[in-house]
């Protein structure tokens, strides 16, 4: 049986022809026509996620893995507002997401009827397109709805970001039919093209600069890009900085930015700063590199990206709208320019890495020690999802395995959907997924476990230090009397209750020896997902991290 509403039948027929077949549905009555249609249609795989905020992040994780749009579907009113955090994240990550919101009839808005909010264009500041379908079933309205749906889906695919279709429904909502009355011929998937502008004119300018830095931000794994960057990294006039979320890992690159970037004085800044900065990809976690480059007064900054061209360092001079691989294939053949720039940075890197090894060798049990151990012990084939705040900052200090695909919601950098994103990714991906999370992100997003789809090979490592320890790390909060209650928000919660409720195998450890004893078996095949809680409450985590950076910066 299918929905009798022609706008729903039309939507359903177009979606699967564009390859959008995963639908995340949250329960409600106004979206009943959509729920009925998608759940009865053989072309679709549907998932029931009650919490709309979690559902949207779940779809974000699925789309990260599949690298194609995933649809979310909810009822009218505040349900649609709960999608917004994940839509913002998808917008800044360029993750394709199709947002389908059921609505009351247009003339019901603002009349004090239930859930009749101003839903049209509700996401307008963080969306690549806002569209609304007509309820009319006249031929001209159906034809116009068809064009609207096509434009929405093409935008979602070509922009690789969130798109919203708002769909008003009048009652009755539950009428069904055995036959789909809409017939559509085969549709051609849109192909992403690049700007017709030729950026070859920039290539000769590359060697006009003596000191060049390439900074790679958050992006999907790309083997072609890695090969090209490896070649460029051998130049004497160029250094390449990456982060673990760059998914580019090589010994020729500088993959631990916060290890190397010291509080440079005026003289040393002149020595280390680039003349030309080429940035690739999206957000960079390191605040240190942002401060350094903003203070460097760059002579030139080129940003190479298919989508975003932000002026992150307040010095942007060229926007290169192209595939990084396409552009770098031309750049890689440029002759080397005589320079000692890479030697200066290489010396700095070697010094800092030696100090890093000395410091972490004999660490007491603490957050930093835990991340060091995880870096050495996580099996090759795992995808990593890392929560925001202190966890992503700790992990950036280590290289992790180049065979891992590593993700973190650094589009908007919120803590609100890390678990839901990881669960969605785990459901969609053939390889097992490990989430590394702090306690605040874990408890904040615990509704992520409220579904039946979590695979048995999903793993969660919860590092519980008893509050938002990030506020003991960043400067400022510790100068106030409100630190523990209103910033850190200290607590005594554990993950044991959640593990029991959601049928996870559960282990809790409090010492290094316990962690090492249990970690290997934690990754063994099992019939249920697993939660490993590492309790570091009462440990001087923030003090040790400060000591770490002080040690790196000692003369």
Image: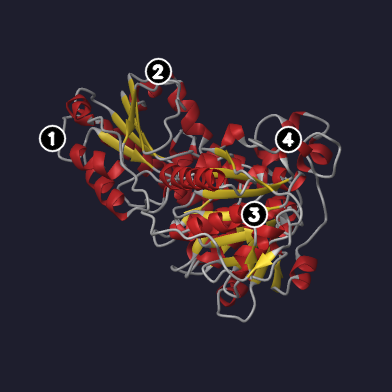
Residue hosting label 3: 73
Residue hosting label 2: 297
Mark 2 residue element? loop
Q: Position of residue 499 (x, y in %)?
A: 74, 69
Residue hosting label 4: 118
Closer mark to the observer between disc 1 and disc 4: 4
Among numbered discs 1 and 4, the one appearing first in the sequence: 4
Q: Position of residue 192 (x, y in %)?
A: 34, 45
Left of 25 or right of it: where is 273? left
Among numbered discs 1 and 3, the one appearing first in the sequence: 3
Residue at point 45%, 25% (across, down): 313
Mark 4 residue element? loop
Left of 337 or right of it: where is 254? right
Residue at point 62%, 81% (across, down): 527
Quadrant housing the C terminus: top left
Q: Position of residue 468 (x, y in %)?
A: 72, 45
Mark 3 residue element? strand
Q: Is residue 130 visible?
A: yes
Quadrant housing the N terminus: bottom right
Left of 403 or right of it: where is 86? right
Residue at point 26%, 51% (across, down): 227
Q: Could you tell me how far apart the alpha carbons at marks 2 and 3 are, in whole angstroms?
A: 47 Å
| 133 shown above or below 205 | below
Mark 1 residue element? loop
């Amino acid at each position: 049986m299918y929905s009798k509403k022609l706008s729903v039948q039309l939507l359903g027929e177009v979606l699967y022809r564009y390859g959008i077949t995963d639908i995340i549905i949250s329960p409600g009555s106004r979206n009943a026509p959509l729920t009925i249609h998608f759940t009865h249609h053989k072309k679709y795989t549907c998932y029931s996620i009650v919490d709309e905020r979690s559902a949207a992040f779940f779809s974000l994780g699925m789309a990260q893995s599949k690298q194609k749009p995933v649809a979310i579907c909810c009822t009218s009113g505040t349900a649609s507002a709960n999608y917004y955090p994940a839509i913002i994240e998808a917008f800044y990550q360029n993750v394709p997401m199709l947002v389908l919101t059921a609505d009351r009839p247009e003339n019901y808005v603002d009349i004090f009827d239930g859930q009749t909010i101003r839903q049209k264009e509700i996401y307008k500041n963080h969306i690549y397109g806002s569209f609304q379908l007509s309820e009319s079933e006249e031929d001209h309205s159906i034809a116009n709805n068809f064009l609207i749906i096509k434009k929405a889906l093409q935008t979602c695919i070509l922009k690789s970001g969130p798109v919203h279709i708002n769909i008003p429904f009048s009652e009755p909502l539950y009428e069904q039919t055995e036959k789909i009355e809409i017939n559509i011929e085969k549709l051609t998937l849109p192909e992403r093209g690049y700007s017709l502008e030729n950026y070859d004119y920039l290539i000769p300018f590359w060697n006009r600069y003596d000191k060049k830095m390439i900074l790679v931000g958050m992006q999907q794994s790309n083997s072609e890009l890695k090969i090209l960057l490896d070649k460029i990294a051998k130049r004497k006039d160029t250094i390449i900085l990456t982060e673990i979320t760059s998914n580019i890992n090589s010994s020729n690159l500088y993959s631990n930015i916060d290890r190397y970037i010291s509080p440079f004085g005026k003289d040393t800044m002149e020595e280390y700063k680039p003349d030309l900065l080429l940035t690739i990809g999206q957000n960079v976690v390191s605040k240190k590199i942002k401060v350094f480059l903003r203070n460097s007064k760059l002579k030139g900054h080129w940003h190479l990206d298919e989508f975003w061209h932000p002026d992150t360092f307040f010095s942007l001079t060229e926007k290169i709208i192209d595939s990084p691989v396409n552009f770098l294939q031309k750049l890689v053949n440029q002759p080397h320019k005589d320079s000692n720039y890479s030697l200066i940075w290489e010396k700095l890197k070697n010094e800092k890495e030696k100090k890093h090894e000395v410091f972490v060798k004999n660490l007491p049990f603490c957050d930093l020690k835990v991340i060091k151990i995880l870096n050495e012990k996580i099996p090759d084939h795992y995808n990593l999802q890392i929560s925001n705040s202190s966890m992503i900052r700790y992990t950036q200090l280590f290289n992790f395995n180049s065979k891992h695909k590593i993700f973190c919601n650094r589009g908007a950098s919120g803590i609100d959907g890390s678990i839901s994103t990881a669960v969605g990714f785990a459901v969609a991906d053939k390889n097992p997924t490990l989430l590394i999370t702090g306690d605040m992100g874990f408890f904040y997003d615990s509704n992520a476990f409220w579904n039946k789809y979590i695979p048995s090979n999903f793993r969660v490592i919860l590092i519980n230090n008893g509050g938002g320890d990030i506020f003991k790390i960043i400067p400022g909060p510790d100068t106030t009397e409100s630190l523990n209650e209103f910033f850190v928000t200290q607590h005594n919660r554990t993950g044991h209750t959640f593990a029991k409720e959601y049928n996870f195998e559960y282990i809790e450890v409090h010492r290094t020896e316990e962690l090492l004893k249990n970690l290997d078996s934690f990754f063994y095949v099992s019939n249920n997902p697993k939660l490993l809680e590492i309790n570091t409450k009462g440990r001087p985590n923030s003090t040790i991290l400060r000591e770490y950076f002080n040690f790196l910066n000692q003369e």
